[in-house]
Amino acid sequence: MSEQDGLPVLPHLAGEFYTWLWWSSEVQGAVFSLPDPVGQIELWVDERLAFRNADDTKVTAVMTGEAPSTSLEARAALAGGKVLNDLRVGIRRDDREFTVTLKGPAMHITGAKLPQVMSEGIDEVLYDRMFLYGELSLVLAALYDTFAEKRVSAAWESEVLPGLRRWIGGEL
Amino acid sequence: MGIMSGAMSVRRFRVVGELPEGWRELFRDRLQELAFKTPPHEVGKEEIEGWVEVHNLLDADFENYNRWLYNEFVLIALRVDKKRLPAKLFAATLEKRCEAWKKEKEVERVPASIRTELKEALELEWLKQTLPTVAVTEAAWNVNEEWLVLHGMSDAVSDRFRKRFFRTFGLRLVPWSPLDWVRTTDTVEGLINKAPSLMASPEDLGELR
C-alpha cells in the first residue's frame, strides 16, 4: 500500500458504515455531535435504500418512496443477511441542507443536491459549488472517522454490534 | 447537470506527482495541444477525443486562462465523439447493393473482395451524412489541494479520463478511498485488519435458514 497506489476500498466497510449511520440516526434522534471543525449536524435516511447479498456486488433490492427506512421490509432485509449497498441521506448543518446518495463500496457521492447557489458568473458559481461540495465531504469525513474509531475499538463488539443487532431484530 | 449545476455525481481522485515550475503556461500549452479538434466530415467510426471548455463543448481554445483556470481550480471537460451507423439498416442496404451488383454483372455470387469494397463505400457514404454521438465529462481540479472530482460514475469513462489526464499533465489520478477520510494511520491499519462484522444476529439468520 503506497502513496502512489492509494488506500484500498474495503467493500464490507461501506455496508457497515451505512447501517451504522441508519441505526445511529434512529437511536440518537438524527443529531450527531462531530469533532471540530464540523460540530453538530442532523442526519436522516432519505428516499432510497439499496441492498445486495453479502457475497455479491449486484443490488438485489431497492426501497424508495417516503421514509423507506421505517418500513418493516427494510430492516427485514438486514435481518435476512442483506448488506446495504446505497444509502440516500439528508444532512443539515446550520441552515444548509444537503441530500446525497452514498453509492457502493467506494462510497461515491451521487445525486448530491447542494444548497441553492445564488451567485452569478462562472467563477463565483464554481467557488460556491466547490465550497459546498467541500462542506459535504467534510461532514461525511467526520461521520466516517467517528464510525472508524468505534469500529476499531473494543466497544464495537461489546456495545455497538449488540445494539445494532437488537435494532435490526426490531427492538427499537 | 454537472459540476456547475444540478445534482452532483462525482468520483474523487488524488492528483499524484509534482507540479512543474511554470505549470500554468505548461498546462495551457498541453491543453491546446490535446484539445478537441473537429475532424473532417469523412472521418470513420473511430472515437475522437480531446479537451474542451466546460462553458461550451464547441470551445476548445485554452489560450485565455480566464476560460479554464479559476485561482486554484482547473475546470475542463473531456469530449469524446463517435459515429455509429444503424447496424440493421446498414446490413439490409448492403444486401441490396450486393444484389444490384450481381444483377448488373449477371453472376450468381458476390466475391468477398467485392463485398468488402461495397461495404467500405457504403460506410464512407453514410459516415459523411452521420452526426456523431457526443459525450462530455466535466472535471474540477483543485491544484493546491491536489484533488480532482470527475462528473461521471462509469469505470470506462473514468479510465479514459485518467489516461488522457496523465498524457496531458504528466500527473496520476489515484482513486480516492473512504479510508482517506480517516484521520489516523493506526485507525486505517485497524480497519484493514478487522474481519467483516455480521450485522444481523446469528440467531435471526438461523431462523431464516
Image (tube, rainbow, N blue to C red):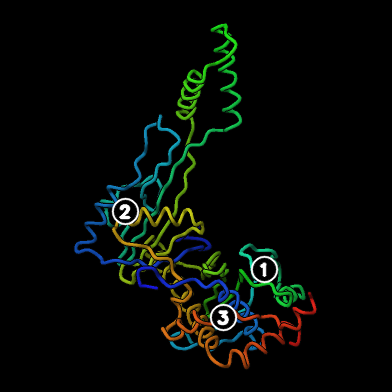
User: Which residue, given by chain and number where applicable, does mark 1 sit on?
Assistant: A53
Vertical position of residue A28 compared to residue A43: above or below: below
User: Which structural element holds mark 1?
Assistant: loop
Q: Relative to B104, say whether B76 is above or below.
A: below
| Host chain of mark 1 | A
**Residue B47 position within the rendered picture, expressed as x and y whole percent measured from the top left:** 43, 41
Where's the C terminus of chain B, which quadrant? bottom right
Same subunit: marks 3 and 1: no
Q: Do labels 2 and 1 share a chain?
A: no
Looking at the picture, which amino acid does disc 1 mark? Answer: Asn
Separation (CA) of disc 2 from disc 3:
39 Å
- Marks 3 and 1, how far apart in space? 17 Å
Residue B195 is marked as 3
Amino acid identity at mark 3: Ala
- Callout in the foreground (2, 3): 3
Residue sitting nearer the eye, A97 or B149 = B149
Taking the view exactly as shown, the residue that stands out farthest to the top is: B106
